[in-house]
């Protein structure tokens, strides 16, 4: 696993847990991480991670509507 060091100004009053969850949610939103990968980065189970996505204005379903319609047409 890679390690990243960020210098966060004290006046922002952010903790490591909150930063990890935000980063995981946004990376999931942009398709950079799968749900499982994002949950692991956030330090949560998949179920718990899906429950916090709304806190970051991230939808659980993050696929383009064209992909969803194409997949649905296969059934």
Image (cartoon, rainbow, N blue to C red):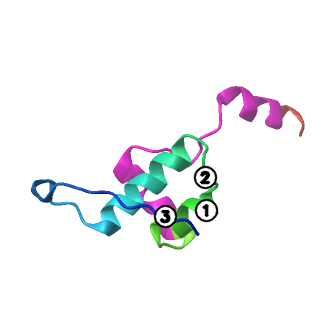
Residue highlighted by disc 3 = 49
- Is 59 contained in the magenta span? yes
Query: How many residues crowd around disc 3 within 10 Å: few (fewer than 14), some, or many (20 or more)?
Result: many
Query: How many residues crowd around disc 1 within 10 Å: few (fewer than 14), some, or many (20 or more)?
Result: some
Q: Earlier in the sequence, mark 3 or mark 2?
A: 2
Query: Left or right: 61 with respect to 67?
Result: left
Q: Position of residue 72 (x, y in %)?
A: 80, 36
Vertical side of 74 occupied by 60: above or below: below
Vertical side of 4 occupied by 29: above or below: above
User: What secondary structure is found at the residue carrying circle 3?
Assistant: helix
The numbered disc on residue 1 is none
User: What secondary structure is found at the residue carrying circle 2?
Assistant: loop
Quadrant including the N terminus: bottom right
Residue highlighted by disc 1 = 37
Residue highlighted by disc 2 = 33
Which residue is drawn at the image coordinates 46% and 52% (left, top)?
25
Q: Position of residue 28 (x, y in %)?
A: 55, 49
Circles 1 and 2: CB atoms closer than 8 Å: yes
Which residue is drawn at the image coordinates 43% and 53% (left, top)?
23
Q: Position of residue 34 (x, y in %)?
A: 64, 55
- Please, which residue is most extreme toward the right here? 74
Q: Earlier in the sequence, mark 1 or mark 3?
A: 1
Query: Left or right: 8 with respect to 40?
Result: left
The stretch in magenta equals 48-72
């Amino acid at each position: 696993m890679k390690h990243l060091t960020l210098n966060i100004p004290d006046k922002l009053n952010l903790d490591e847990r909150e930063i990890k969850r935000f980063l995981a949610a946004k990376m999931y939103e942009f398709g950079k991480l799968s749900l499982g990968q994002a949950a692991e980065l956030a330090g949560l189970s998949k179920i718990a991670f899906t429950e916090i996505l709304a806190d970051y204005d991230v939808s659980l379903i993050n696929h383009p509507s064209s992909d969803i319609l194409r997949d649905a047409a296969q059934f």
